[in-house]
Amino acid sequence: MSILYPQNEMLESRERMVLNLYLVTSLVLFLVMMVLGLLMRLAQGAWMDMSPTLFYQVMTAHGAGMVGTAALASSAVMWFFLRKYVPLKTSIFLANYVLFMIGAVLLLVAIFIGKFAGAWTFLYPLPVQSLGVWSVGSAVLFMVGFLIIGVGFLLFYLDAMRGVIRVYGNLGRGLGLQWLFSGTVDPDHPKTVVASTMVIIVNSLGILGGAVVIVMSLINAYDPEIALNALFAKNLIYFFGHVFINITIYMAVIGVYELLPRYTGRRWGMSRPFLWAWAASTLMVMIVYPHHLLMDFAMPRWMAVTGQVISYTSGLPVFTVTAYGALTNIHRSRMRWRIPAMLLILSMFGWAAGIVPAIIDATISVNHVMHNTLWVPGHFHFYLLLGVLPMQFAFMYHLIGRDTDRSVSRSDRLGFWMYLSGGLAFVFMFLAGGHASVPRRWATHFPGWQVYDQVASLSAALVIVALSLFTVRICLGLMHTPSSAEPAPAGD
């Protein structure tokens, strides 16, 4: 059984070139960022020497770089599938890439030459009060790099917004709001358009919030007499940061909607619960960020309560309809367990499991004890490493052609199981360390904590080897793959 889609996925040579730039760059940056993460764990585990100053530079580069790279790869997933339904400009897609690279270079210069080590959060007034560790110019360069990257993504979302409005009339109709309460839901309304519209709305506002606080911080850097309200600045930073990292999974999950039916041979139609889930998440993702500020006693109580309550539910609507839809799509299907399908199922597990420690930490009584421990990097590494990245890798394997879909090579199978086992061990060491109250963002760990770091280092090395196998396989495939990568029908 084969499935008909609205348009084929043929790419013109220019589109293929730009998409390959996104994918190859993302894979290389993932490897570099993972190596930086491994170096931090080795230093904490006393298996290598690293000065605290260098440690915090590496931590800043790893945090900002990994989130930015995840967004870059996920935007490639969204662009590739959304262009089937609405007109998108390849020039804007390329502009986003160019601005991302310019911003990334500025970040790296600020960190490793200017010695900026204030973490991705650049919390006011830390960037300009470093006690001489870095200069004001380095802090400014770092924030300008962020601003340029944000401009690139905003251009991408504005182009996508233009395309959705051109085809569907407005963003509400793209999101399917007209069917929430009445009417017959169009079963052919694309899930890709619904998810992309949510991303456009939420992350455009998130990026604008980040731009506001960056511009305010830049003004303060050169005129310290213009002081900012520290709590207001922190709210804007975490609104921007929380939205930006969460949107990476909402862009990447488009690949699940588009690819899974091709491996099961079953249609995955539109439904009213699906539309309700995405509409609810559009609001929830924007108001859940106060759970990052539960330890800030000056926060209004109603915002802290809202952050806790919404934290219990914000990830559930979209995940529930996606997981339920995926399971029913797979049930009794003639599923072809090829590497893209295996990665898609792994991503569902990573997304689900990663939510659990996040919900636990969002409980105020737990948050007061656990938030500044390794528990927090445990939860976000869980859903990034085992949720978001497998979605992106599945998409990349899909692109390298029909031939790779007919069998799983030994290197692919080995890479998959190494990635899964290494990733699980790595994130469990974070969670176990958090349970043991090991603090996060410490360059030096006491001997009693170092066993978590050492096991995590070995696990991280395993993940890096697995990712290296994926990278070689995908990059070689991208070099000679045709412009269409449609898999064989189920049962072939």
Image: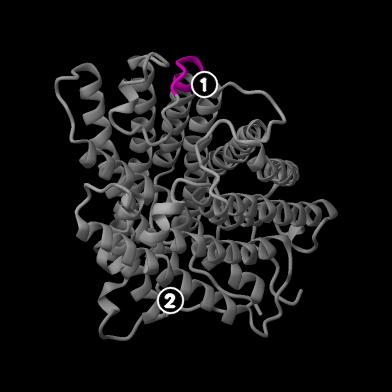
**Front in this rendered view, residue 442 or 72:** 442
Type of the residue with mark 1:
Thr
Q: Is residue 373 visible?
A: yes
Q: Position of residue 254 (x, y in %)?
A: 49, 61
Q: In this picture, is 374 found above or below 134?
A: below
Q: Residues within 10 Å of mark 2 (few under 14, many from 20)?
A: few
What residue would you read off at disc 1? 53
Q: Secondary structure at mark 2?
A: loop
Q: Tell me if label 2 and label 1 are in contact, CB under 8 Å.
A: no
Q: Residue furthest right?
A: 410
Earlier in the chain: of badge 2 and badge 1, it is 1
What residue would you read off at disc 2? 188
Q: Position of residue 66 (x, y in %)?
A: 52, 40
Q: Position of residue 144 (x, y in %)?
A: 34, 26
**Front in this rendered view, residue 143 or 436:** 436
Q: Position of residue 46 (x, y in %)?
A: 69, 31
Residue for point 37% across, 14% down: 135
Tell me which segment is drawn in magenta.
110-116
Figure disc tally? 2
Type of the residue with mark 2:
Asp
Q: Secondary structure at mark 1?
A: helix
**Front in this rendered view, residue 370 or 314:** 370
Specify the quadrant that holds the C terminus.
bottom right
Q: Is residue 158 visible?
A: no
